[in-house]
Image: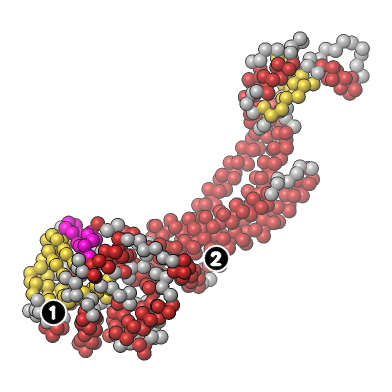
Amino acid sequence: MIQLRAVTKKYKNNYALKNINLDIVSGEFVFVTGASGAGKSTLMKMLYKEETPSSGTVLIGGINIANLPPEKVPNLRRCMGIVFQDYKLLNNQTVYDNIAYVIRTLGISSKEVNARVTGALKVVGLLDKIKAKPTELSGGEQQRVSIARAIVNGPPLLIADEPTGNLDPKNSMEVMQILDQINQRGITVIVSTHDSSLVNYFRKRVITLDNGEIIRDIQAGTYE
Amino acid sequence: MSNAEQTIKGKVKKHIPKDWLCEFRIAYRIIKEVINDLKRTGIVNIFIITTMAAILTIFAALFRTTLSLSEFASQLGNVLEISVYLKNGTDVNTVGQRIKAVDNVVKVKLITKEESWNDLKHQIQMPDISNPLPDTLRVKVNKPENIKAVLDTIKTFSGVEDISYAEELAKKIQILTHIANITMLVVIITVAFLTITIINNTIQLVIQSRKDEIEIMRLMGVSNWYIKTPLVLQGAFYGFTAALIAVIPLKIVNNLLLNVHNFFLVPSPAMAENIVVTSLLLVGILFGAGGSFFSIKKYLQV
């Protein structure tokens, strides 16, 4: 599913990522851990082409996205769900409209949009909040809406950049359990986090970054 | 390669054609986006449209006046003729054919020496003397500015005794036409500049107010053209509405000019009002959409 080969990202004299080599197969659940500034976010951004490597190749589904022309980037992003620490919801729109936004731009019928949105909301357990505005929801609920939006287009890959960074332990656990359930449906899930308790609880593959380098890659690992 | 990988490869690389219903739904969504953007811009819409309407009114009034000036120049130009006086014993048909073949010559009319003499005798009391007048060819040229070139060519023909034409009048007509054309060019450039500046600032404000939303749309994989099109249409809408408003003062200018044409017994240029209204709408829409397009390129990194 994902292959990174000799990926380096350099900002002036600082290396955000150094010679990263990584393989993630379809259906995997991967935690990317490390201290702040270790390169987690840069790595995640590289996967949805918000960042471009200074050198090396990033293959997703066999396509080197480092060379992907700008007009194809939206196509790539529609093949994956992206979840952010700050939710990135449109506060002036309802939960339904937030989730439906992207699929509506594809010309999908209202009936189909409705089916997909309610399906996604069922997965995250927020069907009763369908008409609420994000500002009326708790942080945990907002993040669940963000997850529903990420899966509404049925992506084979979900990228979550610090999804529990703004949440309390209870909500963090709930969000992570939802991501785990999504993974069990066959979707590849990559989560960057520095929440050791969650990593230790779920026992998934753990990739640890330090100063832009992979220092550890363990199956069913812990945070350490 | 797994199914998931194939799905990604297929969706990223290939263009998946959409059916007409799908395209219709997208168009509907885009129109809804435009309406939402206009609602959000609020009262500022009125200021933008009013300012643009004022600019387009100046454009329309000057354009319509230029058309009238051109018509006056053209009518005056029609009375301009070159008189070519021939030497005695010259074959008028041969010289006439040669002149007809000169570029920009529209018509050549022979006035025989007898006709000229009879005309003169009609106008003034003449003593009974032999006819001293030469055969004359009246040459009509398509445009006043071409008279000089035609004149210089004819001068070289054998059998031509002398040439005369209303040089001062021709020069004035030429200057008048030149001024009308230059004025129009300056007006179009000024209108383009002002319209694009206004639209540019407006769309910049819209982009700033929607910065977070556009960022989210971009990250979620909304197509660049889907983000840009409503903004371009918004600019086009401003231009179109302003042009429609500018049609009202244009009507007044048109009526005033018709009175001037009637007074001087010069026909009004054919379809002048329709030409100006069509140009007005086209300029409004094109400059509105164009201004928006350039603004998006400048302020929106998608």
Q: Is residue B251 magenta?
A: no
Foreground residue among B13 and B296:
B13
| Subunit of label 1 | A
The image quadrant where one finds the C terminus of chain B is bottom left
User: Which residues lie in the magenta part?
Assistant: A53-66
| Number of the label disc, if any, that sits on residue B47 | 2
Res. B64 visible in picture: yes
From what the image shows, is residue A140 above or below residue B253? Answer: below
| Subunit of label 2 | B
Q: Is residue A190 left or right of residue B11?
A: left
* In contact (CB < 8 Å): disc 1 and disc 2: no
Q: Is residue B234 left or right of residue A157?
A: right
What kind of residue is marked 1? Lys
Quarter-of-image position of residue B278: bottom right
| Number of the label disc, if any, that sits on residue A204 | 1
Rendering coords of residue B22 (x, y %)? 44, 69
Q: Is label 1 on the same chain as label 2?
A: no
Image coloring type: secondary structure
Rendering coords of residue A175 (x, y %)? 24, 84
What kind of residue is marked 2? Phe
Q: Residue at x 16, y 63 (%)?
A: A4
Q: Is residue A54 magenta?
A: yes
